[in-house]
Image (cartoon, rainbow, N blue to C red):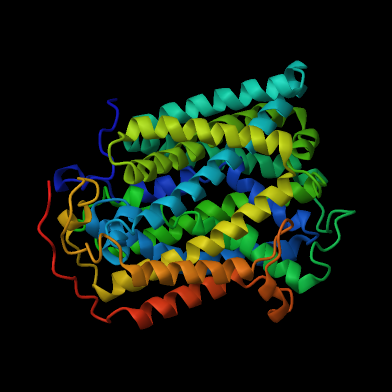
Amino acid sequence: MPIEQRGVDTIPEAERTSGPRDLLSILLGSNLCLGVIVFGWLPVSFGLGLWASLTSVVAGTLVGVVVTAPLALVSLRTATNLSTSSGAFFGVRGRLVGSVVGLLLSLGYTALTLWIGGDVMVGTLARLTGLPTGDVTHTVVYALLAACTAVAAVYGYRLLLRLSKALAIGMTLLLAIGLIAYAGDFTTAAVPDTPYLLGSFWPTWVLSAVAAGLSGPVAFITLLGDYTRYISPERHSSRTVWRTTCLGLLAGLLVPQLFGTFTALAARGGLDYAGPLVEASPAWYLVPLLLAATAGSVGNAGLMLYSMGLDLDAILPRATRARATLVVAAVATAFVFLGHFASDAQSAMTSFVLLLTAIGTPWAVITLIGHTRCAGTYDPEALQVYNRRAKGGAYWFTAGWNARAVASWAIGAVVGLAAVSTPLYEGPLLALTGGIDCSFVLSGVVGGVLYAALTPKAAPAPEPEAALT
């Protein structure tokens, strides 16, 4: 299979041969991994029991899908990735906001997937073979996982699609067997010694809904276009693509997350997940657990790295996608080591997802408002001006920036960060919200309202300047 040569350029109609089933395979297969499963552990680590954990995760995921799924339709129309597509609203240079947000989101989730996958691999190998579990072993396993992931990401979309199709079937079977493996130790009670993280039920429940539920779909705000740009709007309707995206996100996120909640309660994993998960596993499930840790991690992190390569390619047009992917793979691996050797898993995960959700939500809302206003009609050539190191075009605005859109995003992000509640940082606006984290609501509403008020309803494109080649 040849290495994909496409970066963030416009995909020709002849190459847009994927369909809704391929999109469903990617959203389902790539998410059935420990990097997503571990988010089901978060509510338990916050001190919530079974039903509180389930309701918070489901509620947060549903809200996130409502906001995120329509973004899949943007790249269906533009035939390029979402950060580049956002140039229609932020300007061909202002769309770097989306590239940076996407890069940070993918970087964090890639590191998290390799981190938790590597820890489970080390634990299962230790039980199976007596392998020592020291720093050297972790370093080797992390490096091996990262190398496999980088290879898959460099080869690109077609290989990742094949891998996702296989994982959709294989990981479903492994998780189904896992329900049987841990059923004997399952309890509906909250794990002992884990009081409500925020001191009372409702603030903790809301924190769980955002950190464990909403964060899942938000992680895809810049990723969905990586897949739908290969789907032709001439052969597949927007309604079908939207429905498939909703189904893929719901099934792809809820199935592994709820498995994570079930196994966290079964393994009494209130303070840690990977260690108790391996210790509570019956001997006969260790090999399936090892397979889940390796294959699932490569599939999920591979797609994240692929997206990171596209975002870096968008930031640095002179770089090729393959080279950009190798660079971000090295950075992600460094973050894995930092997370393992210097961070507490719960605090790092919670802080990361809440902060990035506050920053990413206003960008997503502004992009959706812009897409609705232009009725899905774009000038694909004008979106590529920055990538070609030229000037002018329908989305040039002022020196390539739509200052009003960028300012709306920035103000929304600042408000969100001021209202966030994490184990490492609490924003000053929490005093006005009763200590409940409303950061994603405030950031999205403020960013969206400002953009709608400051920009023309019809969003007419400014007169283009003469293009320079």
Is residue 302 visible in the rendered image? The answer is: yes
The picture quadrant where one finds residue 129 is: top right
Corner quadrant of residue 323: top left
- The part of the image, by quadrant, that contains residue 86 is bottom left
The residue that appears at 70% across and 26% down in the rendered structure is: 122
Horizontal side of 167 relative to 44 (left or right) equals left
The residue closer to the viewer here, 35 or 94, is 94
* Count of numbered badges drawn on the protein: 0
Provide residue 109's location: percent of width, then percent of height: 55, 45
Which image quadrant: the N terminus? top left
Nearest the viewer among 9 and 410 is 410
Give coordinates of residue 228: x percent, y percent. 31, 52
Residue 36 position, x and y percent, is 59, 47
Residue that sits furthest to the right in the current view: 193
Instruction: Please report the residue visible at 66 percent of the width from the left and 50 percent of the height from the top.
Output: 349
In this view of the protein, can residue 292 be seen by the observer?
A: no
Classify 204 as above or below 348: below
Is residue 386 rendered to the left or right of residue 361? left
Looking at the image, the residue that sits furthest to the front is 399
Residue 40, percent across and down? Answer: 67, 53
Q: Is residue 321 above or below residue 404?
A: above
